[in-house]
Image: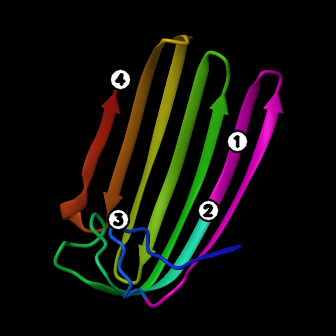
Amino acid sequence: MGLLNGYGIKDYRFSNAGFMHTQNLSYRILIKKSTIKLGYSVMYCKAKNIYFQGILPYTVIYLGNDFRFNFYGNFTSKTVDVQAEYLQAILDTNTASGYYILATVKFNPKNQAYFVFDKYASKDSFLLIDPWYIT
């Protein structure tokens, strides 16, 4: 269990008056020369006058409960890495969620190929974003 006095914003604002409560748990499993890591995080704070760009319209300043959680996994080996994560934010007035999968194929130390798939969705229809496929 941890406490963080902040809201995950890029700009530092001294006016934040609340605490963000966090909890993170992960397990690492070794399999010969490979590693699997699985875990989750949970976060909660009482937001006061915060902009949540990408979740709420840019004109809305939010006051209320901010609850977030995620599940993640990571597989690492000599030739292939795969990382995946699902995230969700739940506000009193809205929800947003998304996930991604990132795969890396390691041909040698200087040559690698990356493949990414991600999707983000918000309760507000103006924020629906089609999935990205990146190679």
Q: Which mark is residue 37?
A: 1
Spatial CA span between label 3 and label 1: 28 Å
Residue type at numbered disc 1:
Lys
3 vs 2, front mark: 3
**Frontmost residue, 39 versus 14:** 14
- Rendered position, 2 above or below 102: below
In the image, taking residue 109 as reference, residue 23 lies left or right, namely right
The residue where tag 4 is placed is 135
**Frontmost residue, 99 versus 24:** 24
Q: Are marks 1 and 4 in contact (CB under 8 Å)?
A: no
Spatial CA span between label 4 and label 3: 29 Å
For this orientation, the residue located farthest to the top is: 108
Spatial CA span between label 4 and label 2: 28 Å
Assign a secondary structure to mark 1: strand
The residue where tag 3 is placed is 10
- Rendered position, 8 above or below 111: below
Residue type at numbered disc 2:
Ser
Q: Residue at 51% of width from left, 69% of height from top?
A: 68
Residue type at numbered disc 4:
Thr
Q: Earlier in the sequence, mark 3 or mark 1?
A: 3
Q: Earlier in the sequence, mark 4 or mark 3?
A: 3
- Please provide percent x and percent y for residue 60: 21, 81
Q: Residue at 18% of width from left, 72% of height from top?
A: 58
- Rendered position, 74 above or below 31: below
Is residue 21 on the magenta stretch?
Answer: yes
Q: Quadrant of residue 78?
A: top right
- Please provide percent x and percent y for residue 21: 60, 78
Structure colour scheme = rainbow
The region drawn magenta spans 17-41
